Image (cartoon, helix red, strand yellow):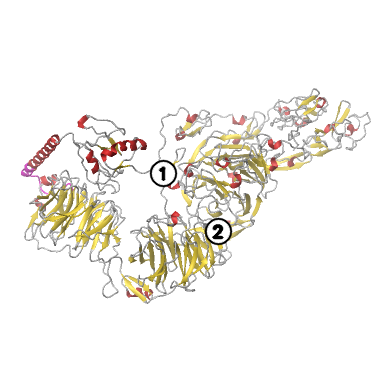
């Protein structure tokens, strides 16, 4: 093809000395002013040079509009004066460069599959209305506007967006019409109690607040975080929490989001490679004196001298003085340069004869000749340039000019030929290439969603929403998948390209996955993680994961792949920013750019152009280079506030910008034609062009059989490499080992990792576990290949296989702070310490047969190690007096080894080969050793900053260091040769070394469990048998009973537990019952060994065996609030109180023959107890008039035995031997007792905070207490010898004693068909056989035949029954009316000037920690008051009213009654059925959103304090800080690690 003439680069120079750049140029009288450049610079030339056919201005502005009279008759004269061949006219090419050769041309006929442009071009029909200007005159895009669907909103500019984007606060329409005319009263989103609200209103989980990650997107979740982890060395931490390069501090450029890096700066500190502007800003030194104002105050261009020759246009001559003149003025006999360099003797100019003309030998010109002012001037045809001799012509290599062709270019003599890569087609301009296939789509992450936009039209759609923090993304076009990383959830996810089928791909071991790339040829997923400082690869589904790069990586960010070449590219913006590449197996690594880089964020590869492009957010530049790093050049270096990600398609670049929150585009060659594609986005992150040509076809080096590799097949150059999972060694050229031989296990709070010693890389691998909250201690069992760990957040002990499979919780009850863990790999036993309960326990490795070994004289035990061969266990105690102890593994022969000069003894290790005990002390900052008796103590390593875990492997010790965030190693005997195994690992906890090549040992317990029925535990002299917690070993020394002889059974809402009284440790043991929601009352049947309990959440009564199996619902209907429960073990009946229905009912133990026993004169009956030998039934009534009543077991002979001096009689129990009744009073704070008639009443103990239930055994009274959260006991005779049996127990409810001496006495019962009720020790009565339960009773719910309500009558209705039922109902109504009248009159007789306090029943629907005071005036209605003081004269009240909390009124006319109020706490309305109150010491007021502010409340209470007694305000909220060394709950001791 012919060369298009005149493709010039405009170089603008200041030609006249002293000429300054201005927006308006004024040259001298005899000069012509060239066109002003885009930078405001001017060029002046002599006036006679205008219209001389020579490009003197460099931009042809001196020749525009000129008519040269010397075109050859064979040439066409263009409108701009240019001469072209006539054969080029109307050929579809713009040869004149002003399109004048293509005007008034007859229309060209296009083919059937082509579209005819208005300018005569023919393009493919598929390109019509595709959003791309293919014709050049945009005639192919004159299309009708698409109509929006019903689920879309139509913008004013005609584009369509998702309907729910209308008035959502984000400008989604380009013209902003979606946010116009929006209602102004749209409430701001409110976050719940478990969420944190970002500055712009978004809600994130509260656990992400102050975690060091920018989860909000504006760093508002990381502001004011005292606990935020410091930045790395060489970094500066912004006030917002963002970490930046310390070299950017005070450099004049605001790199922090809050500009805190430029505050309190005296002078900007620029590096040696930077120039400091007058404004203080630092710019590249290379930008100094480059002709561009980079400083914005032109200070980088001041005082510059021209040190290099300026560049002139191709058809210009460069004079020695730097001036540019037209080639035609060379050797014309005139000193046009001014220094004579264009003439002799500087140029080899031939002598002029004066008779020169074009008619003689073509004027000596090689191609074209013309006479100007009597002088011959030679010119060249299009595609050639004039040589220095002014006569000869040389071919122009158009392919040397960048961007002349989009992709491929072939130079010819006098012309050139552009061509396109496979998958592209040459456009009608014969220079640019268009991708074949569908219309390109820009796919970008927007943090909270992933969206797609068409770059050439206003199409804007949502792909995925409701995301947390999507950063990086990529796609697999052939599989129609999109992948993205979420740095808040630390996950890599995938979904179909239509937004469906969202799945987790990688969910473990990620910290900050900022880069993501898909190998679409070999189906591999690559990602960078700046948190773990490594690059990893896996299959597309996340399997076969491997770390391929880890050394010398700081903060890898962007990543791009070239699968056709088998290479990977990435950026690193750490302390030494660089761009690198390597083969896709991690080999052949090479740095390709490491200068003039600060913050290289985005990276993309132009596969057709074989170039890479990247953005630098610090330098505000977009650069490009060849794929080997050569030919580096800045494409755009102005107008880029904060570019983040970049992609390329055809001839355009597209990038996202954080500051402008926009997507922009520009020409990839020149950086010109910049355009904003989308603006006002939420927070644009990564961006890709979704098109098949962005993932071109290539050779699959691994073939269809994965290259024969057992695991991973990774491309490497022209071949491939078989690779194993991280840490696994190769067993052949293509096979991998299935397990590890030697490795380290270590806990990092929220994950557990391993470091393999089978390979040389020492890279850590995150074991894929779920729901790891705070892993602290861990160990390994080589016998069954399980790892075990404790979680101090979930208070559990867990185990899983090394690959994360078979994960399970083995112990999750009665743990408070499991700090240490050790496996006896010989006998398969699990040992652990608990710093919360101060116990050392043991169990089987599956958690069964749990037993307490040591519980006395322990104060926060920490680490524990065992020696199964020697029979010893060793542990460290971290309490007030730190010590190291030893005992037999059965708890025998306990001995303190070391108790001097210890601070915080953390990790322990036993070196059997060296007969030494090693420990790490975080307070003394030492690792020490002694022999196994605690003697010959010596220091191995010192100082160590903060050691925690310690382990042994071979000849080395390994330890974790909190402060250094490292795993280190040293010689175990000398402590020498300290090296770092892994670093940059915050939150390091325990560590264990595993050597699976070591043979398993043997002890006597390994042979048939030593003959023990339950536990066989080694000791130094042999072994001993042991029983589970609370069970005594039989006299044979080998066997155990199935359960304790005497024990306490108690409920705590969601659990039922027991405490053995046969042993002294008083350890609570769970009864393994499923589906417990809100257990209130319970009892036990010693005959069948079953537990009976009520669940008021499900409104059922159930029974279950002691082992937790065979659960039966015996009463499942017709219950409201079952507060009390009692088993008659003699008559086999079950009694219960229903506070909601105000009834006492009875049934058989299996729930049959249910009958209402008492339903009158009851007002909230609570506790109930039976005395079968006496035939008595006792219960407490907690209503308006509190009382304790008694009747026979059939409900007869009912009488009130106590009704004075009672408040809230909660629990009730009987002493069958002493014939006395005991009860607790939660209002009077005491425990009392009396005889069975209510006489001889005595106070056993007073000042009990809030007792709830009680029971009696031997000479003790046991009770549960809500406020102290404990089970306590005192002597039943004297009330002395108080003792806490169990503490720190939430939700304690009922408690009973199970003992062989408790339920005694059997009776020969009469042959009753339904109920047999014992009236006394001699008499019994039958109640309501099935045939005698009347229809009237059944219809009123007083009895049922089968335990279900309503009952189905088996007989026909009879008239007498109907009459009797009607009369009974009438009597009941009259009784209710009389009661209402009585109460009403009683209220009227009360003095209206005096207020009363009415206490409502503590509800079992809410937690014991969420009780309220409801204080109301007569007649008992709660008044909802405003939160300001107001005098209320009505009802005789003169006291000011205060509304407290959620609509509960506090109202009193007597200031003395304030002393009865103690505490007000919020409740959960979702589970609260009854208003709740208790008597405590102070009133705590809490303001809601509509209440008084804290200052007003304090002022109000101060005014009342002299009258109302003790009133306290809640303290200002403070951030809870856990002990840094423990990370779990525990008592705060002085001079601990957390205070240092």
Quarter holding residue 1473: top left
Q: Which mark is residue 715?
A: none
Give the side of residue 720 with respect to residue 447, left or right. Answer: right
Horizontal and vertical percent position of residue 525: 54, 52
- Bin the neighbour count of mark 2 within 10 Å (Cα to Cα): few under 14, some 14-19, many 20 and up: many
Residue 1362 is a magenta residue:
yes
Q: CA distance from mark 2 to mark 1?
A: 41 Å
Dominant secondary-structure state across the stretch colored magenta: loop
Residue 1472 sits inside the magenta stretch: no
Q: Would you say residue 1152 is visible in this rendering? A: no
What residue do we see at 13% from left, 44% from top? 1340
The answer to whether residue 132 shows anywhere in this view is yes
Label 2 sits on residue: 712
- Specify which label sits upstream in the sequence, 2 or 1: 1
Residue at the farthest front position: 1506
On the image, the x and y values in percent for residue 594 come to 65, 49
Write the start and end of the magenta stretch as one range: 1347-1364
Kindly indicate whether the residue at mark 1 contacts the one at mark 2 (C-beta within 8 angstroms): no
The numbered dot on residue 195 is 1
Compared with 284, 524 (above or below) is: below
Left/right placement of residue 426 relative to residue 1412 reads: right
Q: Secondary structure at mark 1?
A: strand
Number of numbered discs on residues: 2
Give the residue at the far top of this rendering.
Answer: 29
Residue 450 image offset from top left, x and y in percent:
50, 42
The x, y position of residue 185, in whole percent, is: 41, 30
Whether 1259 is drawn above or below 1009: the answer is above
Q: Nearer the viewer, residue 219 or 141?
A: 219
């Amino acid at each position: 093809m012919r060369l298009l003439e005149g493709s010039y680069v405009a170089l603008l120079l200041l030609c006249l000395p002293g000429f300054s750049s201005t927006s308006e140029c004024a040259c001298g009288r005899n000069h012509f002013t060239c066109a002003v450049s885009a930078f405001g610079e001017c060029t002046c030339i002599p006036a006679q040079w205008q219209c001389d056919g020579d490009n003197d201005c460099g931009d042809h502005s001196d020749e525009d509009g000129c008519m040269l009279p010397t075109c050859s008759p064979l040439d066409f004269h263009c409108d701009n004066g240019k001469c072209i061949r006539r054969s080029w006219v109307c050929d579809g090419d713009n040869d004149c460069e002003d399109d004048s050769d293509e005007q008034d041309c007859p229309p060209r006929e296009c083919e059937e599959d082509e579209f005819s442009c208005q300018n005569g071009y023919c393009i493919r029909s598929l390109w019509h209305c595709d959003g791309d200007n293919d014709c050049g005159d945009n005639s192919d895009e004159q299309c009708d506007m698409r109509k929006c669907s019903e689920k879309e909103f139509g913008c004013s500019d005609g584009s369509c967006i998702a309907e729910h984007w209308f008035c959502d606060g984000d400008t989604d329409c380009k013209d902003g019409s979606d946010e116009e005319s929006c209602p102004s009263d749209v409430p701001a989103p409110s976050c719940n109690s478990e969420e944190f609200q970002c500055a712009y209103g978004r809600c994130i989980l509260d656990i992400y607040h102050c975690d060091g990650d920018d989860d909000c997107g504006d760093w508002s979740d990381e502001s004011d975080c005292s606990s935020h982890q410091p930045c790395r060395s060489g970094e500066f931490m912004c006030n917002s929490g963002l970490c930046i390069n310390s070299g950017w501090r005070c450099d004049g450029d605001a790199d922090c989001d809050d500009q805190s890096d430029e505050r309190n700066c005296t002078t900007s500190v620029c590096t040696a490679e930077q120039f400091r502007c007058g404004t203080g800003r630092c710019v590249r030194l290379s930008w100094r004196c480059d002709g561009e104002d980079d400083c914005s105050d032109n200070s980088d261009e001041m005082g510059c001298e021209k040190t290099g020759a300026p560049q002139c246009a191709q058809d210009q001559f460069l004079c020695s003085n730097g001036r540019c003149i037209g080639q035609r003025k060379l050797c014309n006999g005139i000193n046009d340069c001014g220094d004579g360099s264009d003439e002799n003797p500087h140029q080899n100019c031939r002598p002029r004869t004066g008779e020169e003309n074009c008619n003689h030998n073509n004027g000596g010109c090689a191609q074209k000749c013309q006479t100007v002012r009597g002088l011959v001037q030679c010119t060249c045809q299009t595609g050639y340039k004039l040589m220095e001799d002014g006569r000869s012509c040389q071919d122009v290599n158009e392919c040397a000019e960048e961007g002349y062709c989009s992709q491929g270019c072939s130079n010819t003599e006098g012309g050139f030929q552009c061509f396109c890569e496979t998958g592209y087609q040459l456009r009608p301009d014969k220079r640019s290439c268009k991708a074949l296939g569908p219309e390109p789509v820009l796919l970008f992450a927007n943090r909270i969603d992933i969206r797609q936009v068409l770059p050439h039209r206003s199409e804007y759609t949502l792909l995925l929403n409701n995301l947390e923090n999507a950063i990086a993304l990529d796609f697999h076009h052939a599989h129609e998948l999109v992948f993205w990383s979420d740095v808040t959830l630390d996950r890599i996810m995938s979904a179909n390209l239509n937004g469906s089928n969202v799945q987790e791909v990688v969910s473990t071991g990620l910290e900050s996955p900022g880069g993501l790339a898909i190998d679409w040829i070999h189906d591999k997923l690559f990602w960078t993680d700046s948190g773990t400082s490594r690059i990893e690869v896996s299959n597309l589904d996340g399997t076969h994961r491997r770390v391929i790069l880890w050394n010398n990586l700081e903060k890898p960010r962007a990543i791009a792949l070239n699968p056709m070449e088998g290479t990977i590219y990435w950026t690193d913006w750490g302390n030494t920013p660089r761009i690198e590449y390597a083969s896709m197996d991690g080999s052949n690594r090479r740095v390709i750019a490491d200068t003039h880089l600060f913050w290289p964020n985005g990276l993309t590869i132009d596969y057709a152009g074989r170039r890479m492009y990247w953005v630098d957010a610090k330098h505000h530049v977009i650069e490009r280079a060849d794929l080997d790093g050569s030919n580096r050049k800045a494409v755009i270096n102005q107008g880029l506030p904060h570019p983040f990600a970049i992609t390329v398609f055809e001839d355009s670049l597209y990038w996202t910008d954080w500051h402008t929150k926009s997507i922009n585009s520009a020409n990839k060659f020149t950086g010109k034609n910049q355009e904003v594609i989308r603006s006002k986005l939420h927070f644009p992150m990564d961006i890709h062009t979704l098109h098949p040509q962005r993932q071109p076809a290539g050779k699959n080096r691994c073939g269809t059989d994965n290259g024969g590799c057992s695991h991973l097949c990774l491309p490497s150059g022209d071949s491939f490499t078989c690779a194993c999972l991280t840490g696994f060694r190769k067993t052949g050229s293509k096979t991998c080992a299935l397990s590890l031989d030697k490795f380290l296990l270590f806990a990092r709070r929220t994950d557990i990792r391993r470091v393999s010693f089978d390979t040389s890389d020492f890279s850590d691998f995150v074991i894929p576990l779920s729901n790891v909250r705070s892993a602290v201690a861990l160990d390994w069992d080589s016998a069954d290949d399980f790892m075990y760990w404790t979680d101090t957040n979930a208070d559990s002990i867990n185990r899983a296989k090394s690959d994360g499979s078979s994960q399970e919780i083995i112990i999750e009850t009665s743990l408070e702070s499991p700090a240490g863990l050790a496996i006896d790999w010989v006998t398969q036993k699990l040992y652990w310490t608990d710093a919360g309960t101060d116990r050392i326990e043991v169990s089987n490795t599956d958690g069964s047969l749990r037993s307490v070994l040591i519980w006395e004289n322990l104060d926060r035990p920490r680490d524990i190690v065992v020696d199964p061969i020697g029979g010893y266990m060793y542990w460290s105690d971290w309490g007030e007096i730190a010590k190291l102890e030893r005992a037999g593994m059965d708890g025998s022969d306990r001995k303190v080894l070391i108790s001097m000069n210890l601070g915080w003894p953390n990790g322990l290790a036993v070196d059997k080969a060296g007969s030494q005990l090693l420990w790490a002390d975080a307070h003394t900052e030492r690792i020490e050793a002694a022999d196994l008796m605690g003697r010959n103590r010596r220091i191995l390593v010192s100082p160590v900053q903060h050691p925690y875990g310690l382990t042994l492997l071979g000849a080395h010790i390994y330890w974790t260091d909190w402060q250094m965030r490292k795993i280190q190693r040293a010689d175990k005997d000398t402590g020498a040769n300290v090296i770092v195994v892994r670093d940059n690992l915050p939150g390091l906890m325990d560590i264990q070394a595993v050597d699976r090549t070591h043979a398993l040992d043997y002890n006597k317990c390994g042979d048939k469990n030593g003959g023990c029925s339950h536990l066989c535990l080694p000791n130094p002299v042999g072994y001993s048998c042991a029983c589970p917690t609370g069970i005594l070993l039989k006299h044979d020394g080998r066997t155990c009973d199935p359960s304790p002889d005497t024990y306490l059974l108690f409920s705590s809402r969601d659990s039922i537990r027991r405490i053995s009284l046969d042993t002294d440790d008083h350890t609570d043991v769970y009864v393994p019952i499923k589906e417990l929601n809100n257990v209130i009352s319970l009892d036990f049947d010693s005959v069948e060994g079953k537990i009976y309990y009520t669940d008021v959440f499900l409104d059922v009564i159930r029974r279950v065996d002691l082992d937790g199996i065979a659960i039966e619902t015996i009463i499942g209907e017709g219950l409201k609030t079952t507060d009390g429960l009692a088993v008659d073990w003699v008559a086999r009946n079950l009694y219960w109180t229903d506070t909601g229905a105000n009834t006492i009912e009875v049934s058989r133990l299996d729930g049959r023959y249910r009958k209402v026993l008492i339903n009158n004169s009851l007002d909230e009956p609570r506790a109930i107890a039976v005395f079968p030998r006496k035939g008595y039934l006792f219960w407490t009534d907690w209503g308006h008039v509190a009382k304790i009543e008694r009747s026979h077991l059939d409900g007869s002979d009912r009488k009130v035995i106590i009704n004075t001096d009672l408040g809230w009689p909660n629990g009730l129990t009987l002493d069958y031997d002493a014939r006395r009744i005991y009860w607790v009073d939660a209002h009077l704070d005491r425990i009392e007792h009396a005889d069975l008639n209510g006489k001889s009443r005595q106070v056993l103990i007073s000042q009990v905070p809030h007792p709830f239930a009680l029971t009696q055994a031997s000479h003790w009274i046991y009770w549960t207490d809500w406020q102290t959260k404990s089970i306590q006991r005192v002597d039943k005779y004297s009330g002395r010898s108080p003792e806490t049996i169990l503490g720190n127990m939430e939700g304690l409810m009922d408690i009973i004693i199970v003992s062989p001496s408790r339920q005694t006495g059997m009776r020969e019962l009469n042959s009753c068909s339904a109920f047999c009720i014992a009236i006394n020790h001699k008499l019994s009565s039958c109640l309501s056989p099935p045939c005698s339960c009347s229809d009237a009773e059944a219809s009123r719910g007083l009895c049922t035949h089968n335990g279900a309500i309503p009952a189905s009558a088996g007989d026909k209705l009879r008239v007498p029954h109907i009459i009797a039922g009607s009369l009974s109902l009438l009597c009941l109504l009259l009784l209710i009316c009389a009661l209402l009248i009585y109460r009403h009159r009683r209220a009227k007789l009360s003095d209206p000037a005096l207020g009363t306090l009415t206490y409502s029943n503590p509800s079992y629907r809410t937690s014991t920690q969420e009780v309220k005071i409801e204080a109301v005036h007569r007649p008992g209605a709660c008044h909802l008051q405003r939160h300001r003081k107001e005098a209320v004269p009505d009802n005789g009240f003169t006291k000011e009213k205060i509304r407290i909390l959620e609509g509960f009124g506090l109202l009193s006319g007597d200031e003395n009654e304030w002393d009865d109020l103690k505490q007000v706490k919020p409740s959960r309305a979702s589970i609260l059925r009854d208003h709740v109150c208790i008597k405590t010491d102070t009133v705590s007021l809490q303001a809601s959103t509509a209440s008084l502010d804290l200052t007003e409340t304090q002022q109000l209470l101060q005014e009342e304090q002299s009258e109302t007694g003790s009133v306290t305000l809640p303290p200002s909220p403070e951030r809870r800080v856990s002990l840094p060394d423990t990370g779990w709950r525990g008592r705060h001791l002085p001079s601990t690690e957390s205070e240092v």
